[in-house]
Amino acid sequence: LPAAAPLPPEDGKAIWSAGEVPEGSAGDASWDPREQPEYEIVFKQQVRAEDLFLGMSRKDPSTACCEDMLIKIKLPDTKASDITLDIQEKLLDFRSPQKRLLLHLPHPVDATKGRAHFLSEQSTLEVTLRMKRELDFINFS
């Protein structure tokens, strides 16, 4: 059987179409001279009294039962107005005049249900993202 012909690029000068580029590869920051900030990823889960004391839900302390991912980015000498943040399903792209962080996320997230807070007294940006998982209806019903 003959192989299917590739789709032509949308732009006449492009050598490949957007569908042929793997997700996340467009944001390669290896050429960027800005320093990568220190960061930490913490997983969070919503726990109620019946979860903690009675064990009525199927939740356990593992990351498989966490709903949110919290990314803490240390940003000394940075103002909130200097920050640019772009969230995609598997990629966090943070930029400021001095620093750049291109972070491939360990789990897919819902980019529309995130929130970010800049804690100026701690010089830390906290980004909370809701994780998307195939079996959420089992874990979080």
Image (cartoon, rainbow, N blue to C red):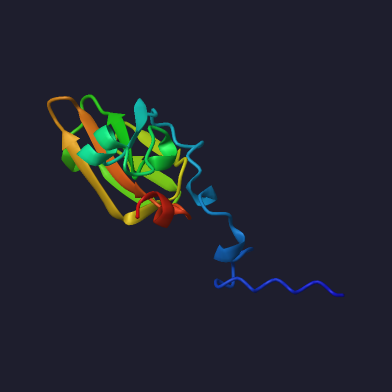
Residue 37 can be seen, yes or no? no
Quadrant containing the N terminus in the rendered view = bottom right
Q: Quadrant of the C terminus?
A: bottom left
**Which residue shows up at 46% across the image and 54% down it?**
135
Q: What residue is at 55 percent from the left and 71 percent from the top?
A: 11
Residue 92 rendering spot, x and y as whole percentages: 39, 44
Quadrant in which residue 16 is drawn = bottom right
Query: In the rendered image, which quarter is residue 42 located in?
Result: top left
In depth, the one of 45 and 83 nearer the eye is 45
- Can residue 94 be seen? yes
Measured along the vertical axis of the image, is residue 134 above or below residue 94? below
Q: Residue 78 in the image: state x and y as whole percent.
A: 21, 31
Q: How many marks?
A: 0
Q: Residue furthest right?
A: 1
Q: Is residue 94 above or below residue 4?
A: above
Q: Position of residue 128 (x, y in %)?
A: 28, 42
Could you say which is closer to the camera, residue 57 or residue 93? 57
In depth, the one of 29 and 71 nearer the eye is 71
> Does residue 132 appear to the left or right of 113 in the view shown?
right
Residue 116: x and y in percent read 23, 44
In the drawing, does residue 13 fall left or right of residue 5?
left
Residue at the extreme left of the image, as rendered: 121
